[in-house]
Amino acid sequence: MPLAASELILNSDGSIYHLNLLPEDIANTIITVGDPDRVGDVSKYFDSIELKKGKREFHTHTGVLNGKRISVISTGIGTDNIDIVFNELDALVNVDFKTRREKTAKTTLDFIRIGTSGAIQTEVSVDSFLLSETSIGLDGLMHFYDSIKLQDQDYANKLSAHLAWQTHHISPYVFDCDTELASSLNSNRIRFGTTVTNAGFYGPQGRSIRLDPKLVDFHQKLTSFRYKDKQITNLEMETAGIYGLSKLLGHRAVSMNAILANRATGEFSSKPSQTVDELIKYCLEKI
């Protein structure tokens, strides 16, 4: 049955609603960044740029680097935006916009998030690079999808018991990166870690400026948890949604983090722009 106009929303030019993109506008390898200004920070290293489009916080550049076609897209902050971006990108390759029906033959996209993050373990150095081997969502997005069979449910159950935050309506979900894609981005510069994706930047990450946090044991609970001898290493706001939706939709995803802060030591990078630029160049060399 064709998708209704209220479900698959297209603009007057046939582009998908929020991203303002046509199917031919994107490559099969897609770099996602949070900040729209960072799109140009990535595409300036392309050999050529064939397309630049933007709508709201969603900016896209598609070009070629070393003979490989690549798109870079800004998602904005948070898994609410990830829900929009990843569903619409999937629709661009796996739905026929003329018939409004799902295609029989599916296309697999490779997603590489290049983002910033804060460490919660003292040994994770500021200005280092961390690949999110496992992602833990504390935001709730994936509970709106039938995703239990693809999650690491044992991890989620043990973490939930450790946190004992059920009375706060927080139920973690857990997804891993694509191991093959992660292997292609690995080197001795990269630390593998377990990343928590939060619903916000202040209270949901244990920060307090004028409002007292409800979870007074936030960092202690996360830093003290162990699963198969692995610690939770860092916090950010997109990775778990990226991994979860990619698994459900049949895509491959890896999140690469520039560690700009260490919440355990109170440090913040003295060269954040340089560190992010170094991670961008590293990822482009690998893909």
Image: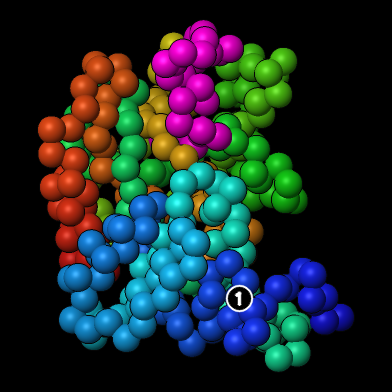
Q: Is disc 1 surrounded by few (<14), some (14 to 19) or many (20+) residues within 10 Å?
A: many
Pick the quarter of the image with the C terminus: bottom left
Image height of 167 relative to 108, above or below: above
Q: Nearer the viewer, residue 198 or 131?
A: 198
Q: Which residues are magenta?
A: 194-218
The x and y percentages for residue 17 are 62, 71
Q: Is residue 41 magenta?
A: no
**Residue at the (53%, 66%) spot, across then down:** 251
- Is 88 left, or right, of 195 in this rendering? right
Q: Is residue 216 magenta?
A: yes
Q: Which residue is mark 1?
A: 16
The x and y percentages for residue 151 are 62, 44
**Residue at the (61%, 76%) spot, across then down:** 16
User: Disc 1 residue type?
Assistant: Ile
**Residue at the (45%, 83%) spot, across then down:** 25
How many numbered marks appear?
Answer: 1
The x and y percentages for residue 278 are 15, 52
Predominant secondary structure, magenta span: loop
Q: Secondary structure at mark 1?
A: loop
The x and y percentages for residue 224 are 43, 14
Inspect this view and state whether residue 55 appears: yes
Inspect this view and state whether residue 188 appears: no
Q: Quadrant of residue 23?
A: bottom right
